[in-house]
Image (cartoon, grey):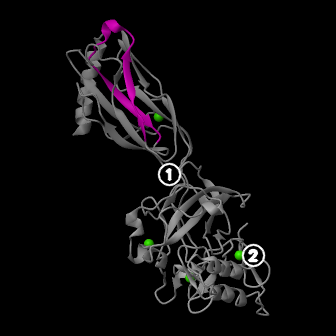
Amino acid sequence: MKYLAQSVWMVMLSVAISVAAEAAQIVTPSQSSLSTGAEAFVFTPVYTISSPQTATLTGLGLRIHFNSSAVQFNGVTSPYAYGLQPVGTITADTEDFDADPLTDSYFVVGWVDLTARWPGTGMVPLNLLAASFQPQAGFTGITHIRTTATVTADAAAFQSTPMTVTLTGSPPAVQVRAFLQGSYVMLDGKMRDSLRESGVLPASQPYAGFGYNGSETASPALLAMTGNDAPVDWVLVELRDSTNPQTIVATHAALLQRDGDVASAADGATTLTFTGIAPGSYYLALRHRNHLGVMSAAPVVFSGAPVLVDFTAATTAVYGSTDIRLPAASVRMLPSGDANNDSKLIADGPENDKNTVLAVVMVDAGNSEINTNFQASGYKVTDLNMDGKTVFAGPGNDVNILLGNVLLHSANTTSSTNYIVRGSMP
Ligand SMILES: [Ca+2]
Ligand SMILES: [Ca+2]
Ligand SMILES: [Ca+2]
Ligand SMILES: [Ca+2]
């Protein structure tokens, strides 16, 4: 039906224009070039005419050509109403009307006024419509949106200028999963959200002291969530340079959920998008305040769809000569115990993490009697088992988890308390 209707008006327009005035109908894009990543963009053809004396004609039939590998046509909004015909469907440009073999598709929009008053006195220049296009995931480079006329009138010539669109590609998007040993509960295969429950989990990302000054803030609704998606703690997700993995290209502070998903603090979405970063290959790293960090064994290729990096899976290879993660049945956890944030777990000897725990307990304002078994409440990096308290001695203390990781480390064959467990992050 639509095709038939279009054929009829195209013939009518052809006849009408052939007896029209000597003028060129001109279509230029409102914006001659633009650059976009994953965001949709709008093509607005602007109609003018070369001779003011013939500013009104019988209409215009317009093909809008595009490369379907580069962009997806999302539809037309705000078409000029006077004389408007039904917008055509997407058609293969097998005849290559625009002499650009890369533009493989087009659709037709037309306006017909057999009284030859189109588009109306004083209407030019006229925005004919707004056509929305979505960049195709994975396409990068330059593409064009071109226009041709459906009718060749011997009186009214047609002139057009294309729009040049530079597609920089979808920014890297990642879904990350991880378990933290300090809060992991083997029996239910999830982490505790004790920090959230005890009300000490901060609303703003806590990594300023770790060299990251992002402004991520979680909404009260996200911080109030319970169940599998309740926030356990803040983590840092980093893209690192594929040839120099010590170079951090981009960082997101995000919330780790009880079930291991890393979620955006902005909206709780479990896909993190690195807006403004070019697609390509990056190492993907995950860091935590008092656990040893992990990074993908090899650069991850980001070319469109979100990539899952599941650090809870034993099959996910991690960077370094040995896998620093700890097994918990079939899953893997980041090891806890780095109270002084030097990427080493040390229980005894110089720079040890145990003394950092002790110091926090001893200097706590509430510990007036300076007891080593005092429990210092609050969100502290020394809370290695993530229960909302820093405890040096006695039940539930934070030292045992550190000591266990040192003594039970596979390379610590003599079970020495002064063995150093080194992190594998570059
Ligand atoms: Ca073409
Ligand atoms: Ca989840
Ligand atoms: Ca340490
Ligand atoms: Ca604790």
Q: Is residue 389 left or right of residue 358?
A: left
The quadrant in which residue 413 appears is bottom right
Q: Hey, which residue is sitting farthest front in the picture?
A: 368
Region rendered in magenta: 41-67
- Give the residue number, with chain letter if any, for mark 1: 137
In the rendered image of this protein, does residue 87 appear above or below residue 318? Answer: above
Q: Is residue 240 left or right of residue 105?
A: right
Q: Residue at x 64, y 63 (%)?
A: 210
Numbered label tally: 2
In the rendering, at what x and y percent does residue 103 appear?
Answer: 48, 37
The quadrant in which residue 241 appears is bottom right
Mark number displayed over residue 206: none
Q: Nearer the viewer, mark 1 or mark 2?
A: 2
Q: Residue at x 53, y 75 (%)?
A: 378
Secondary structure beneath dot 1 equals loop
Q: Residues within 10 Å of mark 1 (few under 14, many from 20)?
A: some
In the rendering, at what x and y percent does residue 99 appear?
Answer: 49, 29
Secondary structure beneath dot 2 equals loop
Residue 337 visible, this orientation: no
Q: Nearer the viewer, residue 233 or 58?
A: 233
Q: Residues within 10 Å of mark 2 (few under 14, many from 20)?
A: few
In the rendering, at what x and y percent does residue 234 appear?
Answer: 53, 68
In the rendered image of this protein, does residue 233 appear above or below residue 399? Answer: above
Q: Is mark 2 within 8 Å of ligand 3?
A: no
Of marks 1 and 2, which one's residue comes earlier in the chain?
Answer: 1
Tell me the CA gap for discs 1 and 2: 35 Å
Q: Is residue 358 left or right of residue 137?
A: right
Residue 222 visible, this orientation: yes
- Give the residue number, with chain letter if any, for mark 2: 321
Q: Is residue 285 magenta?
A: no
Q: Nearer the viewer, residue 150 or 283?
A: 283
Going by the numbered disc 2, the residue's amino acid type is Ser
